[in-house]
Image (spheres, rainbow, N blue to C red):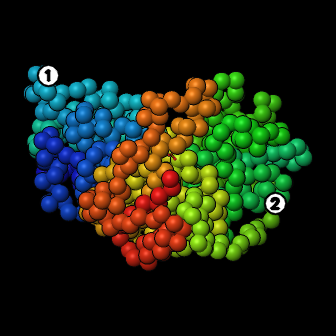
Amino acid sequence: MTGAESLLRTLLANNIDICFMNPGTSEMQFVSALDRVPAMRGILGLFEGVCSGAADGYARMAGKPASTLLHLGPGLGNALANFHNARKARSPIVNIVGEHSTQHLGHDAPLTADIEAFARPVSGWVRTLASAGAMGETATAAIAAAIAPPGQVATLIIPADFSWSEAGDPGPILPPHRRAAPQRGQILTIAKALRSGKPAGILLGGQALTEPALRAAARIAAATGASVYANRNSGRMSRGLGVPAATRIPYFPEAAQSLLGNLAHLILVESKPPISFFGYPGLRSTLAPPDCALENLAAEGEDGLAALEALAEELGAPRVIDVPQNDRPALPAGEPLTTDAIGRTIAALTPERAIFSDESVSSSERIWPHLAVAPAHDYLPVTGGSIGQGLPVAVGAAVACPTRKVIALEADGSAMYTIQSLWTMARENLDVTTVILANRRYRILDIEMKRTGAGPVGPLADRMLALSAPAPDWVRLSEGLGVRAARAATADEFIREFRAAMREPGPALIEAVLD
Ligand SMILES: Cc1ncc(C[n+]2csc(CCOP(=O)(O)OP(=O)(O)O)c2C)c(N)n1
């Protein structure tokens, strides 16, 4: 068995059967092994940022890693921004990077680079394979590192000769991992704080934003009057009709500080203390009041659900929570196309158990409230602030959940970073509807320009923010990459196109013209 085959068999034995890849000469052995090991599904991305973002989206929805296969330092370099987002999402990913053969490495060939240095800032574990014979064991070590709670990118660099040489058996199969249970003493301390009668909040992050954890938090809120908040940059959140709500911490620090302003206690569940996205002149970066006591109920990587349930029991919280079942909104009629009209339409027409990949940037605050009355769904935000992740994450989510509708809410500027994702959606016939919010500007930067006190936007500065001359033609771009597409300039047109996209499976794109 060659090293390449041993690697693929080790991944499969450990239940990793997807590889988002963009290979080159040093990875040819892996590509050819796909025909001998067909249980590994190779998915081609036409830019490495698609591969890393797709592996992130896959991990968030599947709860287990995909692998990525990238070409040398430059291939990894192209993938870094979305590995950065994956790192912030705590997504487990086994990232395999090909390296020159060992005898070639000393010659400083054109593609030679310090791959470990490229990998380190986004990876929790980095290793260059030492010999072909060590392949199985080292691959298992990479998988163990990736899935160690709370999850991380593990980068395994493989010299080409080790993949074409004879290797030993595949590596061992890992036992299922357990997240640490809550500390009894900590639960009692926090129960006491919540019984004190002082204003308290519970901030949920990580895996504590799934429905069972939201339900446990709602039980605690019912028993104590505490408010329940959501970390806006956590990888995945359950939401919609029938799901207990958590208030998302606002993006701008003034609104966030005012929301949390009266808290005496903030209980952290799989979340760091809340901080502002950016620092601004004269503003604090921390969002909780300076005298608020921060208490860790479960650290990142610990079992927040078990901790919340134990706390609810300790507090004698009601077992059943009544979640109001609001009506779905009425469709807009005869209205211009606004972000509100888009939000209402999506909430009214989205099917059960949809998955939203949200990279709607400046449109998000207007669309977000409407999704509260969409059917129960999963919501995947941008975790690390690096735009160009929404479409790749949608690809990965659709691969992980082939029976669910995925809806990518995409600001036009962000969508251009990894537009190649559309081709992978078409190639793999993924059930993703992409809504392009075509305001033809880097709109959020207009707002940030004012907030940072950077001065007025003159005509030359404006050319750095406007996407209008020429405006990208999304219908032609999408069709050119194999995804059916339509343009909507009124609410009625948007309703027609969105309804059709929800009825018909497979990839579709709607350009929603907002200017
Ligand atoms: C990789 C990366 N490059 C640049 C930025 C800076 N940036 C933040 S928002 C933004 C423009 C967003 O424009 P668009 O996606 O069209 O959304 P809009 O603000 O119009 O809603 C840019 C360039 C970033 N966050 N990440």
Q: Amino acid at mark 2?
A: Ala
Q: At which x and y percent is residue 447?
A: 59, 38
Residue 510, numbered label: none
Q: Is residue 343 visible?
A: no
Element at badge 2?
helix
> Going from the N terminus, do you reach mark 2 or mark 1 first?
1
Would residue 440 be seen by someone viewing this image from the given angle?
Answer: yes
Query: Is label 2 in contact with label 1 (beta carbons under 8 Å)?
Result: no
Q: Amino acid at mark 1?
A: Asp
Q: Residues within 10 Å of mark 1 (few under 14, many from 20)?
A: few
Residue drawn at point x = 63 percent, y = 46 percent: 231
Q: Position of residue 493 (x, y in %)?
A: 48, 70
Residue 108 image label: 1
Q: Residue at x 28, y 46 (%)?
A: 47
| Label 2 CA crowd tier, 10 Å (few <14, some 14–19, many 20+) | some
Q: In front: 226, or 94? A: 226
**Residue in front for this viewpoint, 7 or 241:** 241
Q: Quadrant of residue 16?
A: bottom left
